[in-house]
Image (cartoon, coloured by chain):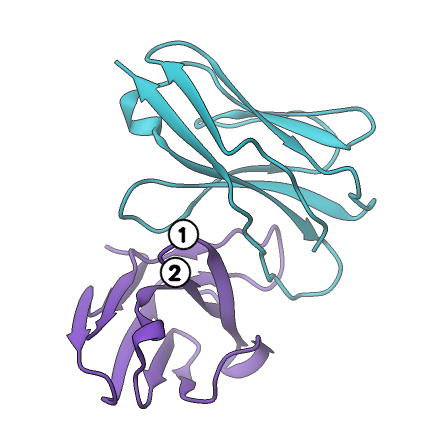
Chain colours: A cyan, B purple
Amino acid sequence: DAKTTQPNSMESNEEEPVHLPCNHSTISGTDYIHWYRQLPSQGPEYVIHGLTSNVNNRMASLAIAEDRKSSTLILHRATLRDAAVYYCILRNSGGSNYKLTFGKGTLLTVNP
Amino acid sequence: DTAVSQTPKYLVTQMGNDKSIKCEQNLGHDTMYWYKQDSKKFLKIMFSYNNKELIINETVPNRFSPKSPDKAHLNLHINSLELGDSAVYFCASSRTTGTGELFFGEGSRLTVL
């Protein structure tokens, strides 16, 4: 799986938007960009994924750069419950093997 | 209903013992995984099964033996436990086709004394 680079940590205030960046300069044309998050003492949970176009769902938005070498996960209004480690992962769409390789992720702290 | 459930949630045992962790998913998925998260919080894939067949086997000591009796279950048996096996073990499942979104269990924390 191609490598991603994320800041180790970020801080936000409650009810403010949060933009979590991810660099993936070696992304291939068939790599999907996936985001997962892991709340304290829980298993990772899927947040969102995309290929080329920006994506929105009930949890977040994903903005993908035109050259696809970077992306940004957007939490529109952070809550205390959003404090977690956020992982940006590339998954190749070829084949049926869904091995996801997790990096260090970004630890998001949300201040009240 | 819990989608991916693991038992036990906590396991404390002595070095040299043999222990098992069980995992069940009720999502109808045909691919299941075991991940290990060590004290530094790195999540690493250990095994993956698709329709009861082993498809991923990372560099894991052969003391670890996964078993998939059917596609809804993937158990992890560990022989001769060592201190370094202490970690949180996560089970996950996904569909083979489609977006490949993984659903994780809550984890099983293994402590080897």
Q: Amino acid at mark 1?
A: Lys
Q: Quadrant of residue A15?
A: top left
Q: Is residue A32 left or right of residue B20?
A: right
Residue drawn at the location 74% of the way across and 47% of the way down: A31
Residue B85 disc label: none
Is the Cβ of the residue at disc 1 closer than 8 Å to that at disc 2? yes
Residue A78 in view, yes or no: yes
Q: Measured along the vertical axis of the image, is residue B66 above or below residue B8?
A: below
Kindly state the secondary structure of the residue where label 1 is placed.
Answer: loop
- Regarding residue B30, the answer to whether it shows in the image is no
Where is residue A4? Give x, y as percent: 66, 42
Point out the image quarter for the C terminus of chain A. Answer: top left
| Secondary structure of the residue carrying numbered label 2 | loop
Which chain letter goes with mark 2?
A: B
Q: Is residue B62 left or right of residue B5?
A: right
Q: How many numbered marks are there?
A: 2
* Chain for disc number 1: B
Hey, what amino acid is under mark 2? Asp
Q: Circle 1 is placed at which residue position?
A: B41
Q: Residue at x 38, y 60 (%)?
A: B38
Q: Which residue is mark 2?
A: B38
Give how far across and how far down residue B56 sits, in percent: 59, 75
Q: Give percent across and percent down for residue A17.
A: 46, 12
